[in-house]
Image (cartoon, helix red, strand yellow):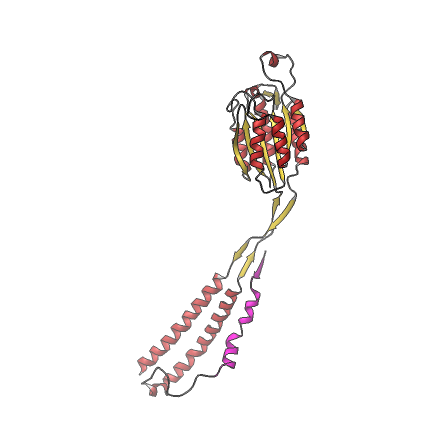
């Protein structure tokens, strides 16, 4: 922390009154003043001594007032300690599948079997929390795709809305292409060269107005890099197929990632999902640059206030002397 003057050159004005007094001609003497003093006899006596005392301290007050006025013009500032500001210029969109199959309980967290969406919430929430410096957005999709959170630095809000997601809220089918299309629409206007989409799903595309392949082509043209994550444990009994549930289309997810310059990951449990997010932290670093900010507190109002008070004291003192001489007359 330090004290500095923003306009140091203003201190050159300090000797200005002396220069004015030395260079400008003196006021003409004689009986040409606008104020006539009828009690001249008093001035020749004790009144002169009273008047001669006043200008001395008033002069010092005037000098001090001028000094404080110049100091205020120099803008004194209190500079705080440097504060680091993480910057990355990265816009990261998270698209989470909330179709009916995400209710499948084949994931384990802390020794407890949970459904797929619960595991995604737990791990993805921590991932979002670590993205300091990035703008994060959230898309939820099932039969339709919805923008739940626009790109924002408010990671707490993004996490909260992710935790509030419910299976089946967007329909029971899966529109992977629509989710990618919506993400591209939101990312293409971003003022950054780093546009990233992380797509999590446990099935295959069964709905939507646009296919995953076409959506991936649009993403590649726009410069959106897509990392795809296939979620769900391996089928142990084939029950999912028997119930008509769509198996994970790994070929399509891998093709989407390859076409856009991303990577495909397979998450069979919460541990693998956590490891995937750790790898994504390395692939998409949180910080690519750093700036510093030093808080500035303006202090010019204090010397300015002192200058005004001293000026008022000078004027008040002169008025008092004149009134005293008038009473003496």
| 52, 22: nearer the viewer | 22
Q: Position of residue 327 (x, y in %)?
A: 31, 80
| 261, 117: nearer the viewer | 261
311 on left or right of 131: left
Against 220, residue 167 (above or below) is above
Q: Position of residue 183 (x, y in %)?
A: 57, 33
Task: Report the quarter where the C terminus lies.
Answer: bottom left
Q: What residue do we see at 57% from left, 67% from top?
A: 9
Q: Position of residue 201 (x, y in %)?
A: 60, 24
Q: What residue do we see at 32% from left, 85% from top?
A: 39
Q: What residue do we see at 64% from left, 24% from top?
A: 230
Q: What residue do we see at 52% from left, 74% from top?
A: 16
| 274, 101: nearer the viewer | 101
Against 66, residue 210 (above or below) is above
Task: Report the quarter where the N terminus lies.
Answer: bottom right
Whether residue 265 is visible, yes or no, is no
Count the labels in the image: 0
51 on left or right of 250: left
Q: Quadrant of residue 47?
A: bottom left
Against 57, residue 250 (above or below) is above
Whether residue 52 is visible, yes or no, is yes
280 on left or right of 8: right
Q: Position of residue 175 (x, y in %)?
A: 56, 24
Residue 24 colored in magenta in the image: yes
Q: Which residues are magenta?
A: 1-25
Residue 140 colored in magenta in the image: no
């Amino acid at each position: 922390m330090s004290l500095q003057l923003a306009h140091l050159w203003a201190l050159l004005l300090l000797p200005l009154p002396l220069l004015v007094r030395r260079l400008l001609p003196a006021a003409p003497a004689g009986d040409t003043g606008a104020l006539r003093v009828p009690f001249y006899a008093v001035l020749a006596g004790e009144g002169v001594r009273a008047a001669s005392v006043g200008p001395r301290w008033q002069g010092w007050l005037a000098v001090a007032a001028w000094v404080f006025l110049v100091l205020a013009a120099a803008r004194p500032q209190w500079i705080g300690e440097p504060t680091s500001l993480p910057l990355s210029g990265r816009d990261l969109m998270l698209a989470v599948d909330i179709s009916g199959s995400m209710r499948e309980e084949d994931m384990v967290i802390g020794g407890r079997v949970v459904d797929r969406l619960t595991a995604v919430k737990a791990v993805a929430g921590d991932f979002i929390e670590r993205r300091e410096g990035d703008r994060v957005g959230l898309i939820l999709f099932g039969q339709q795709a919805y923008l739940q959170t626009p790109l924002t630095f408010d990671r707490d809000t993004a996490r909260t809305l992710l935790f509030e997601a419910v299976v089946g809220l967007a329909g029971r089918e899966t529109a992977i292409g629509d989710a990618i299309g919506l993400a591209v629409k939101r990312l293409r206007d971003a003022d950054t060269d780093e546009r990233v989409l992380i797509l999590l799903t446990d099935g295959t595309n069964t709905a939507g107005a646009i296919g995953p392949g076409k959506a991936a082509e649009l993403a590649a043209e726009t410069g959106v890099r897509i990392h795809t994550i296939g979620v769900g444990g391996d089928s142990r009994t084939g029950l999912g197929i028997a119930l008509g549930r769509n198996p994970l289309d790994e070929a399509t997810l891998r093709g989407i990632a390859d076409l856009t310059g991303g990577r495909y990951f397979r998450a069979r449990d919460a541990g693998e999902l956590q490891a995937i997010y750790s790898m994504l932290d390395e692939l998409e670093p949180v910080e690519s640059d750093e700036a510093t900010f030093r808080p500035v507190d303006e202090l010019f109002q204090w010397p300015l206030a002192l200058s005004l008070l001293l000026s008022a004291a000078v004027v008040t003192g002169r008025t008092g002397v004149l009134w005293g001489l008038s009473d003496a007359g």
